[in-house]
Amino acid sequence: MRRRKRPVIPKQPEKERFSLVGKIKGAEFFQYTGSYLRIRIALILLVTSLALGVGGFMVLEGYSFREAFYMTIITISTVGYTEVRPLSPNGQIFVSGLILLYIGVFSYSVSAFTFYVIQGEFFKQIHLNFLGKKIKELRNHVILCGFGKYGKEIAAHFMAHRVPFVVIEKDEEEVQSIQKGTARILYIQDDATHDEALVKAGIEHASAMISALPDDTENVFTVLTARQLNPRINIISRARDPRSQRKLMRAGANHVVMPEQIGGFFMATLVSKPGAVEFFSFITNHYGSDIDFEELHYEQLPPACQGHSIRDLSLRRASGANIIGFKKANGEFVVNPGPETVLEPGSSFIFMGNSDQLHALHDYLDHYESSHGMPSS
């Protein structure tokens, strides 16, 4: 008689088996809860023990709440003051058990607090509270979502130009790189796609948000969430797939940047116009040059300057900065606008110059009315 072979059950991968156990028993049992939970449990045990002692004295000995609370406190502290009144046999047994219970609770509480301090959680919480306070004070800042290779470059640019910003990063290694770095960077360890993370970053007071996450789907969710929380914020997002560009614009992004596409364009242009690309790389590399760009909107001009041409304003002669672009109200650009170009509502000028020239430009416009003998508005 032939023996029937037992069916072979395929072995589950370790990851799947772990996930299955997690689903059956509860995934939270496999997560490290940290010392915060230990402190919370210790506080719950102390309060519960206190309530148990007060209730026991009131029921077994007929004490008032004040007397029961007093007896519970001297029992916990083992001070040994005189009892309110002699205890009954049941009361003596109850107090004996209560003392043993308090010994265990006290030992657990001391160990939890000691672990909390030794592991650095106490000072970590102080550090996080300090960061939260500083973030709440920010106004007209930039929220940078993602501290990867692009996020680090953006942060370096902001620090060089003293632009206030806060980083949202969920990866533990990237957060540790911020903590161990010498730069003082405000950060939040959280998922940027969550509403709570953007609210903690002060999105209602932010002027702009950059979503530099490596995944296009996460960028779409982040942009969509940010646009709902602050309809007026300027949103710039990174994209890897060209098909994601339209989705990001529909989600609410004002600008979508594709770093790989820009890098490919630069490398291709280096073949035909190497000098022009090298010059552009030089003026945009702020670590090696003092050249910068500035956009001046019509609304930023003093009333006395509005409605006048480039020739009438004498901006280059007064500051040395060059007007290299003119952005019309409909979004079109004019390269090297002529001297008769007039800045209109909704339009802006693009300036190029070093830091001294751009500073002189702002100083010239701030004192334009007084220097031309006009009453200030």
Image: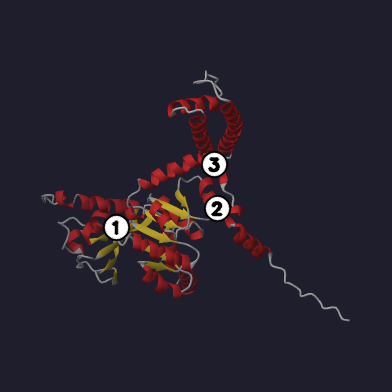
Element marked by disc 3:
helix
For the residues labelled 3 and 2, the Cα–Cα distance comes to 26 Å
Residue at label 1? 321
Q: List x then y, in percent, for residue 208.
A: 35, 58
Q: Earlier in the sequence, mark 2 or mark 1?
A: 2
Residue type at mark 2 is Glu
Residue mark closest to the camera, 3 vs 2: 3
Please tell me whether residue 151 is drawn above or below residue 121 in the rendered image: below
> Which residue sits at x=35%, y=48%?
138
Residue count near mark 2 (Cα–Cα under 10 Å), binned few <14, some 14–19, many ≥20: few
* Rendered image: mark on residue 172: 2
User: Pointer 3 and pointer 1: residues touching (CB < 8 Å)?
Assistant: no
Q: Note whether residue 279 is visible.
A: no
Q: Nearer the viewer, residue 55 or 59?
A: 59
Element marked by disc 2:
helix
* Rendered image: mark on residue 41: 3
